[in-house]
Image: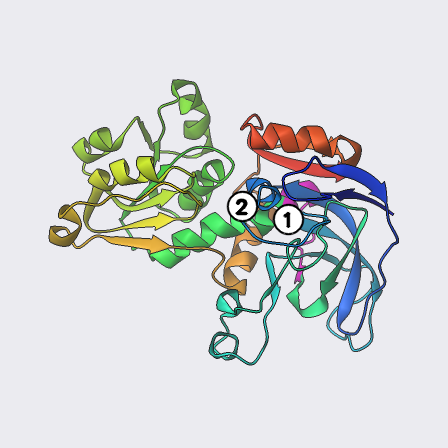
């Protein structure tokens, strides 16, 4: 089969012919229909997330099961599925026993501890796969398995109440989805962006208001929840001024910058929440919104043969808004 290979740390990606894998017990073989290329792939390539090379990356996979291993009963050949970031844990530690395998120190991550989805075929543990709604396309489904899942999990974890306001900081690959999820869930939604050329777009996506900064957000009464969808903690620190009392800021992007807070966080009883992908029910819900047409992924599609160029575009922030490999 054809696969994208990262030969070594911080090295250019290559297309190679490699053997098609065979499923072991409790695994399935998936013919990839679409694979999202996420900025996390850049982090992994550059060493911010440790793995062993050579490696095929890719953790936004969707496709059709073409073979099942011994012991698989819940999935069958022909099922349309996707695979999230965390496939499995040790099943013995406190976190696994509490149903929170995302905290397991021995977790198996797609494209990190396994070969990922930037290839014609990929193995996955059967019980980690999520069945896709019939009405969702592969192109729309793939980015949900990281980007959509991440922002919807963050919003749900913040637990906004009826009549509360939700603000989205950064309108990019995650942010354009966060605006739509917030509006689809019925919340008054405010986009925070300095880009004037994005104002019409974010209003079309469902934003009730668009502001340039925290000061403008504060003048209009502030937000109860701020979803930080970008990688700048400097911007997140500034946005704290826009939180109402008892407000929650949710961080879902990785940054090497320090997060600076003032004493206002005490007097306002504000909370800063770190969030990733917080449970299977949130993935189910995130897919359902897309399948029902309430959320639409804006993406650029490419061939696997072009993946080196696509990687450069993602790394340089040139993609609008998600990059998806659909031609394997």
Q: Who comes first in sequence, dot 2 or dot 1?
A: 1
Residue bearing mark 2: 147
Quarter of the image for residue 318 reads top right
- In this picture, residue 229 sits left or right of residue 137: left
- Residue in front for this viewpoint, 127 or 119: 119
* Residue 69 percent across, percent down from the top left: 82, 71
Quadrant location of the C terminus?
top right
Secondary structure of the residue carrying numbered label 2: helix
Q: Is residue 194 visible?
A: yes
Above or below, 229 against 246 in this view is: above
Residue at 65% x, 42% y: name it. 36
Quarter of the image for residue 283 reads bottom right
Residue 136 sits inside the magenta stretch: yes
Quarter of the image for residue 202 reads top left
Give the numbered dot on residue 60.
1
Q: Which residues are magenta?
A: 130-142
Residue 131 sits inside the magenta stretch: yes
Residue at 32% x, 35% y: name it. 235
- Residue in front for this viewpoint, 2 or 34: 2
């Amino acid at each position: 089969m054809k696969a994208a290979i990262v030969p070594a740390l911080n090295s250019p990606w290559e297309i190679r012919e490699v053997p098609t894998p065979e499923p072991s017990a409790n695994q399935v073989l998936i013919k990839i229909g679409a694979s999202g290329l996420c900025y996390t792939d850049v982090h992994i390539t550059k060493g911010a997330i440790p793995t062993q090379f050579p490696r095929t990356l890719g953790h936004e996979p969707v496709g059709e099961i073409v073979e099942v291993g011994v012991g698989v009963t819940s999935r069958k050949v022909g099922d349309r599925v996707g695979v999230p970031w965390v496939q499995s844990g040790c099943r013995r530690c406190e976190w696994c026993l509490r149903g929170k395998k995302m905290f397991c120190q021995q977790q198996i991550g797609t494209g990190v501890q396994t070969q990922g989805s930037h290839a014609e075929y990929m193995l996955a543990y059967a019980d980690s796969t999520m069945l896709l709604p019939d009405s969702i396309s592969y192109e729309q489904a793939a980015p949900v398995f990281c980007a959509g899942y991440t922002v919807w999990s963050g919003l749900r974890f913040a637990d906004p109440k009826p009549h509360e306001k939700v603000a989205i900081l950064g309108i990019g690959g995650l942010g354009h989805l966060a605006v739509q999820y917030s509006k689809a869930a019925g919340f008054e939604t405010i986009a925070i962006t300095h880009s004037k050329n994005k104002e019409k777009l974010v209003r079309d996506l469902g934003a009730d208001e668009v502001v340039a900064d925290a000061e403008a957000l504060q003048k209009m009464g502030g937000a109860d929840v701020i979803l930080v969808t970008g990688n700048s903690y400097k911007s997140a620190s500034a946005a704290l001024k826009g939180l109402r009392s008892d407000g929650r800021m949710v961080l879902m992007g990785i940054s090497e910058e320090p997060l600076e807070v003032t004493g206002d966080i005490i007097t306002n009883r504000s909370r800063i929440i770190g969030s990733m992908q917080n449970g299977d029910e949130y993935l189910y819900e995130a897919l359902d919104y897309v399948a029902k047409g309430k959320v639409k992924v804006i993406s650029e599609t490419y061939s696997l043969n072009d993946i080196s160029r696509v990687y450069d575009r993602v790394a340089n922030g040139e993609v609008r808004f998600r990059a998806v490999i659909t031609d394997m």
